[in-house]
Amino acid sequence: MLRTVGLLFKLDTPDHEIARAQFRSLAKQVPLLYLILICNTAAITSEFFRAEMPFRTLVIPTILCVIASVRAIWWLRQNAERAISDEDLVRLIRRTCNLAFILTMAFEIWSASIYGLGRSKSRGQLIFFLSLTEVSTIFCLMSIRAAAMRVAAVSMAWSIGYFAWIGAGQNMVESIVMFFVSGGLMVIAFRYNSEFTQMIHSRRDLRLRQIESETLSRENARIAVTDALSGLPNRRHLLARLDTLESELDRPLDSVAIVFVDLDGFKEINDAHGHHAGDLLIGSLSERLRETCPPYATLARIGGDEFAVLVETHGATAKAVAIAKRYRAEINLPVLVDQHVLQVGSSIGIAGNTSAPLKASELLRRADTAMYHVKTHAKGEIAVYQETFDEGRLHRIAVQAQIGAGLARNEFDVVYQPIVNAKSGAIVAAEALIRWPGRSEGPLSPDHFIGIAEATGQILSIGLFVLERACRDFQRLTSIKLSVNVSPAQFRDPTFHRQVAHILEQTRFPARRLQFEITEGYLLADAYRAIDGVRAFRAMGISVALDDFGTGFTSIHYLQSYGFSHIKIDKSLLEDLHRESKASMLIEAAVLLAKGLDMRVVAEGVET
């Protein structure tokens, strides 16, 4: 119990934030407190002054007033909140607490020393002034519990221990009132101090939460404009910057350009080695490109395998071309990922505001169009936007829309190219070929729409259409096998096997009479997936032929591993075919190789 009571009078060692708050409170209240002390001291002195006792009635109160004035002036200077260390703050608060006790004792002792000099009325006034002084002092020191408690305790002790009994108890009532007032003030000081501390803690918690919220908000804002994989600015950041440039109406010509970079062969790496390897490749390439990006350019990753560089400088288009060449060289370098050497290429398009101010969206579209022109005409090259590029783009968009409508309106047809036995001359199989005779704008050859269908994914629908139509057409021709081309996109589709099985079931076409053809290019680009696909179809009873043999670099090991039933010699090898020619020797070698591997040979382009 005594220990608990003792803790009320002990000065806490608060954290530095509470100490600073207490110091600010004291800087506001203490000057007023000293002013009250000076006024009360002057009032008591005027009432109790005795010329024959100058030391007690004039010198001592003057000294007390001087001390109070000096302290008041010192505290007034603290309102500027000059830089004070946390350690100095604690020291100053401790000194204030001690001075409060000492000055209270000094005023009480001085009051007791002159108490007997006054008449009854004067003594009552003295007690009244002391009570006011006590109340004022406690209220001004409430932010420091120990100081307020000590002042209240001293006042209680003097009110009972001295003023109540001196003079035969004439001021007993006033002393008792003063005693209980002091006790009440102690309770008020204790509660106020607790609430003061809680308020400081609440403010600190609120400020910390606000700081955390602002930090989180800044981080969210950063994440919103940053690509998570590469750490580069993302598409949103690029568009925001372009919008800012668009608002600058006085932007000079050829001061802004965009380099649009698309990686060639990235999808194949993802398919062959997994997305983890693809992510590592993107991270490595991003770091390379970032290191070579000049200060007047902004590199951003705007898609899965697409990057863009915003160039902001005089002569932006020429400098964009230089950046594109440097980036193409960096991208072409091999990258070691998980002990695999991976390599991709790049198709790059460039657009700048060379002839007229352009909107941000138009500038980006032109760079994308230039990149797509490279992608479809000469992969691995760099092209600066030209208006003629839009003609091809618009044509592709139109054909893309027409393909979907044509399938719905049954505008496509399937024709068949016979495969003839070279010895007997009998037709042993037929290859299904897609045609588009019913197109409202006029027939379009496969060379003009197959590439677009593959790029847009529409080849999946076209391929299933060809397969189903051919199976129905040849269902009753039991002596002839059916050969159907399969695009790489169909082979990559995980649902393709189930779709083929469903068509065979619906058309009742025997799987043993069906043969798929895949190109040698896809075999080389995605060997592992191609092997799995061939094995899956062979397990269904479908044979698989290698198309365009001789145009790539297929190894004998691959031919053995895949289990092809046929190889189709590309017609380019049959040009100028005559005895003693090198072409003739190549064809003979291919036939012997196929026979050695127990495969049949089909030669394309035999017209005579």
Image (spheres, rainbow, N blue to C red):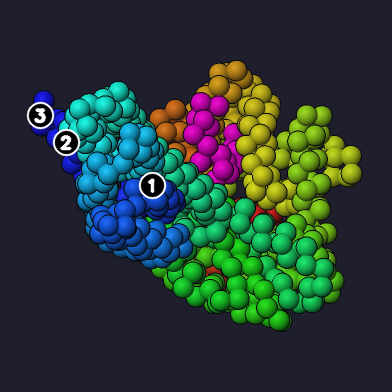
Depth check: 119 or 353 in front? Answer: 119
The residue pinned by badge 1 equals 47
Residue for point 40% across, 51% down: 46
**182 or 306: nearer the viewer:** 182
Instruction: Identify whether 578 is placed above or below 194.
Output: below
For mark 2, what is the residue?
7
366 inside magenta stretch: no
Q: Position of residue 466 (x, y in %)?
A: 67, 34
Q: Nearer the viewer, residue 103 or 45?
A: 45
Mark 2 neighbour density, 10 Å: few (under 14) some (14–19) many (20 or more): few
Q: Which dot marks residue 2?
A: 3
* First in residue order: circle 1 vs circle 2: 2
Quarter of the image with the C terminus in it: bottom right
Write the start and end of the magenta stretch as one range. Answer: 482-499
- Measured Cα–Cα span from mark 1 to mark 3: 41 Å
Residue 387 is situated, as x and y percent measured from the top left of the image, at: 83, 66
Q: Which of the 4 image quadrants contains residue 58?
A: bottom left
Q: Quick check: can you spot residue 209?
A: no
In the image, 1 versus 382, the foreground residue is 1
| Residue at x 80%, y 35% (from the top left corner) | 406
- Which quadrant of the figure contains the N terminus? top left
In the displayed orientation, state which residue is furthest to the front: 52
